Image: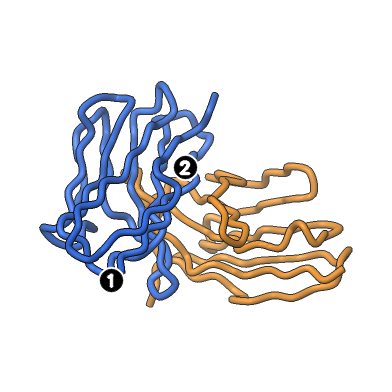
Amino acid sequence: DAGVIQSPRHEVTEMGQEVTLRCKPISGHDYLFWYRQTMMRGLELLIYFNNNVPIDDSGMPEDRFSAKMPNASFSTLKIQPSEPRDSAVYFCASTQTGRGKGYTFGSGTRLTVV
Amino acid sequence: KNEVEQSPQNLTAQEGEFITINCSYSVGISALHWLQQHPGGGIVSLFMLSSGKKKHGRLIATINIQEKHSSLHITASHPRDSAVYICAVNRFGNEKLTFGTGTRLTIIP
């Protein structure tokens, strides 16, 4: 199993540009999570999906952020327009209900907005 | 007050020492997780606990549900154990994780 795959690994963009982060969860996992990590705030949940349906998006900072999961093997997190304060590492993670083996995290996308 | 508290925040030790990192939580949980993050690296799940004790190599994790407390122990510590260790919990009926602030461990050769 290749694990949770995120792309790109690094993204540098100018303020105001649209940014799209991508995630492929582990096959068979029914939960997918998007987290953001910053020095100031640590790890924060942005949104999570169950069976491709958004369950809790209360962590999404504002309307500039949106996430989709069109199928069980792909999710996107979009920021439009991007701002310097969005600079962070964004992690995707997946898990399977009742498996009792915890979460698998992707390698993260380091986003820098200049 | 955070729902998940870790101590210490930073820990420096000599290679070979026995390490203990503590986690206390204030909510009802269905599971507790210990995660590891190396500098500039990804996040790896070490343990998922709902009761008792688990062991993997030199790492041991314990949980006391009544006291709402968990510990992560590292025996015969090694410089490659240097990382941030994060405690996280699932509240009852909730798959999302609530994180502690992490413990930065540095093992000196």
Residue A114, above or below A58: below
Q: Position of residue A57 (x, y in %)?
A: 19, 50
Of residue A71 and residue A53, the one placed in the foreground of this image is A71
Which of the numbered marks, if any, corresponds to residue A106?
A: 2
Of residue A96 and residue A70, the one placed in the foreground of this image is A70
User: On the same chain: label 1 and label 2?
Assistant: yes
> Going by the image, does A32 lie left or right of A71?
right
Which of the numbered marks, if any, corresponds to residue B4?
A: none
- Give the SS element for disc 1: helix
Q: Which chain is blue?
A: A
Report the amino acid beneath label 2.
Gly
Q: Sequence order check: which comes first, mark 1 or mark 2?
A: 1
Q: Residue at x 28, y 71 (%)?
A: A85
Q: Which chain is orange?
A: B
> Going by the image, does A78 lie left or right of B45?
left
Other-residue count near label 2 (Cα within 10 Å), few / some / many at <14 / 14–19 / ≥20: many
Q: Which residue is mark 1?
A: A85
Quadrant where the N terminus of chain B lies?
A: bottom left
Q: Residue at x 56, y 62 (%)?
A: B69
In this view, the residue farthest toward the front is A14
Instruction: Give the Cα separation between the discs numbered 1 and 2.
Output: 22 Å
Which chain hosts label 2? Answer: A
Q: Nearer the viewer, mark 1 or mark 2?
A: 1
> Going by the image, does B71 lie left or right of A82?
right
Q: Position of residue B104 (x, y in %)?
A: 62, 70
Other-residue count near label 1 (Cα within 10 Å), few / some / many at <14 / 14–19 / ≥20: few
Report the colour scheme. Answer: by chain
> Going by the image, does B64 lie left or right of B15?
left
Q: Residue at x 34, y 34 (%)?
A: A31
Report the amino acid beneath label 1.
Arg
Rendering quarter of residue B56? top right
